[in-house]
Image (cartoon, rainbow, N blue to C red):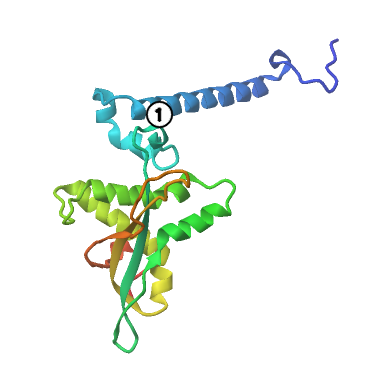
């Protein structure tokens, strides 16, 4: 009789139930890897019939955890920092309307990432991608046509309220919110003779009324 002692037992030496479990696990892992590779391939490949037909499923799988971003290798890499800032109009218990100061959500994200050795893609990309999505669906006058623009607005509002509703609600009923971006140029290296303006540029969006759909799950308008 062959004895294996403490050495790993080969698959043939396993019991039938153990072999079934190993086979099922191996099959599940293989299927998961195949699905992941297929999703990523369809996402980065040129548009085709399959990727267009299943674009919603593909995007839901890819974003935000598996986002592909090749700007590092672009001919014209980004040379500016864009910060997303928010404020609110709050109705106090004394029926006064209070406008809060601006809160820099990008700076909050930056501080959280600085002390996180393994930040998620959601931490890194949620706010940035939401703002890019808004810009890509609106013109310079913040006008949009179509459902994608309305979806972008709702997405931005929900992110803002998810992060700020508790803080603002402590001061009263949140009636409206406003979002703006602050764009500043990245300073050139010390050896460069390039001259750039360090003055920030702002883009303010109109005031948006807050609805129940904008609040985090379970929260209610006061």
Q: Residue at x 33, y 24 (%)?
A: 45
- Determine which residue is flagged by label 1: 40
Query: Few, some or many C-alpha atoms within 10 Å of disc 1 (few <14, some 14-19, many ≥20)?
Result: some
Q: Residue furthest bottom?
A: 94
Q: Residue furthest top?
A: 1
Quadrant showing the N terminus: top right
In this rendering, is residue 158 above or below 94? above
Q: Nearer the viewer, residue 46 or 219?
A: 46
Residue 216 is at least partly visible in this image: no
In this rendering, is residue 95 above or below 48? below
Q: Nearer the viewer, residue 146 or 76?
A: 76
Q: Nearer the viewer, residue 151 or 21?
A: 151
Q: Residue at x 84, y 11 (%)?
A: 2
Quadrant showing the C terminus: bottom left
Residue 178 placement (x, y as % from top left): 28, 66
Q: Nearer the viewer, residue 162 or 198?
A: 198
Q: Residue at x 40, y 29 (%)?
A: 40
Residue 209 figure quarter: bottom left
Residue 214 placement (x, y as % from top left): 31, 62
């Amino acid at each position: 009789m062959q004895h294996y002692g403490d050495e790993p037992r080969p698959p043939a030496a396993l019991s039938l139930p153990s072999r079934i479990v190993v086979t099922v696990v191996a099959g599940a892992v293989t299927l998961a890897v195949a699905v992941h590779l297929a999703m990523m391939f369809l996402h980065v490949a040129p548009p085709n019939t399959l990727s267009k037909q299943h674009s919603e499923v593909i995007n839901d799988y890819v974003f935000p955890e598996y986002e592909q971003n090749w700007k590092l290798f672009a001919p014209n890499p980004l040379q500016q920092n864009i910060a997303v800032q928010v404020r609110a109009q709050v109705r106090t218990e004394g029926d006064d309307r209070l406008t809060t100061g601006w809160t820099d959500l990008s700076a909050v994200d930056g501080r959280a990432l600085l002390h996180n050795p393994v930040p998620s893609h959601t931490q890194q990309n949620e706010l940035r991608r939401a703002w890019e999505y808004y810009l890509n669906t609106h013109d310079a006058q913040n006008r949009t046509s179509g459902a994608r623009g309305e979806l972008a607005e709702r997405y931005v509002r929900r992110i803002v309220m998810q992060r700020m509703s508790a803080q603002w609600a402590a001061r009263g009923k949140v009636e409206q919110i406003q979002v703006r971006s602050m764009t500043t140029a990245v300073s050139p290296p010390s050896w460069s003779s390039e001259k750039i303006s360090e003055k920030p540029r702002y883009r303010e969006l109109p005031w948006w009324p807050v609805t129940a759909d904008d609040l985090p799950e379970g929260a209610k308008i006061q």
